[in-house]
Amino acid sequence: MRRMGAEELRRALPWPALEAALERIFREGCAAPLRHRHALPQAEGPEGTLLLMPAWELPGHPGRRHTGVKIVHVLPGNGARGLPAVHASYLLSDADTGVPVAMLDGGELTDRRTAAASTLAGRFLARPDSRRLLVIGAGKVAGALAEAWCARFPIEEVAIWARNPARAAELAARLAAHGVPARPAASADPRGFDIVSVATLAEEPLVRGAEVSPGTHVDLVGAYRPTMRESDGALLARATLVVDTRAGALAEAGDLVQAIAEGAITEAAVAADLAELCRGAHPGRTRAEEITVFKSVGWAGEDLAAAVLAAAG
């Protein structure tokens, strides 16, 4: 069985090829149940979480079929141990025989497929001439998003904002060293930016509808639990709202769940999911001044598509 670490995955998953692989699986479909979430009681410290994300290609899929499952441990108490809070692995297998094909670094796989899903949606929702990007957050996903957006659009400026200014400055410097035109931002004010990409663990809105300029595309990546949110209801009410999957977003996306509970929007506010964009069932952006929002919570089909692409290299 092949083992692929983070560095090998970065080489095996270039942004254009990865985005194309995601487009294919959203267009063609696969079986991908909602993620399994299980509590992990700890002898000491806060409770952990075990996440399981399975997916498999269906009969009739051309060529070799695969199954895959991502196994994620989230252990907040690891900070006291000097360890990352999240550890993830991905097992890719042959769907017909069950023979394992590859074990991949789940963290790198997740970061890259998450960013590629955002730019895939952005291809339909952001203005083609988008040049100014604001990234809110300074973690690994935020770095991947900055790289992916610059690979997709003619970005001339990347502003990085985080609650911890030192982390924003560190990420901006790291990106700049690799040719990304990044700088730390003094605030998270979205006005004047063409694309605003948010990847945080926020539980209070960071992007408010009243502050977003006409024509902006807002990409909401964090808030993968109902108790979390990165935007207010006013933004979702103003925007053409697209999600990665309706089932996942309406069950888990705090931005939607809370806005619906507040009465700011209804479920009917979701104009399309990403599969409908990829299949041409929804046109995406239709006006230059239109505000668009893409809300993702992650879909196991994305992991499967990325793993198959990586293992084929």
Image: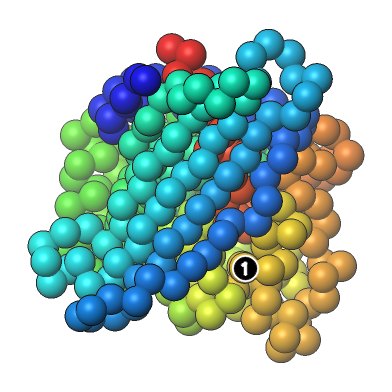
Q: Is residue 111 left or right of residue 80?
A: right
Residue at x 11% of width, y 62% of height: 82
In the foreground, 138 or 279: 279
The image quarter containing residue 218 is bottom right
Q: Is residue 6 left or right of residue 127?
A: left
Q: Is there any visible trace of residue 251 in the rendered image?
A: yes
The image quarter containing residue 156 is top left
**Residue 186: percent from the left, percent from the top?**
29, 67
User: For the N terminus, which image quadrant?
Assistant: top left
In the foreground, 27 or 53: 53
- Per the image, label 1 sits on a secondary structure element best described as helix
Q: Amino acid at mark 1?
A: Glu
Mark 1 residue crowding within 10 angstroms, few (<14) / some (14–19) / many (20+): many
Q: Is there any visible trace of residue 223 in the rendered image?
A: no
**Residue 33: percent from the left, percent from the top?**
68, 51
Q: Is residue 52 left or right of residue 174?
A: right
Residue at x 32% of width, y 26% of height: 4
**Residue 310: percent from the left, percent from the top?**
45, 22
> Number of numbered discs present?
1
**Residue 131: percent from the left, percent from the top?**
50, 40
Residue at x 77% of width, y 86% of height: 263
Colouring: rainbow
In the foreground, 173 or 61: 61
Q: Is residue 195 left or right of residue 42?
A: right
Residue at x 43% of width, y 12% of height: 313
The image quarter containing residue 304 is top right
In the rendered image, which residue does mark 1 sit on?
252
Instruction: Give above or below for 44 relative to 102.
Output: below
Instruction: Give above or below for 52 relative to 23.
Output: below
Instruction: Give above or below for 310 relative to 262.
Output: above
In the foreground, 304 or 111: 304
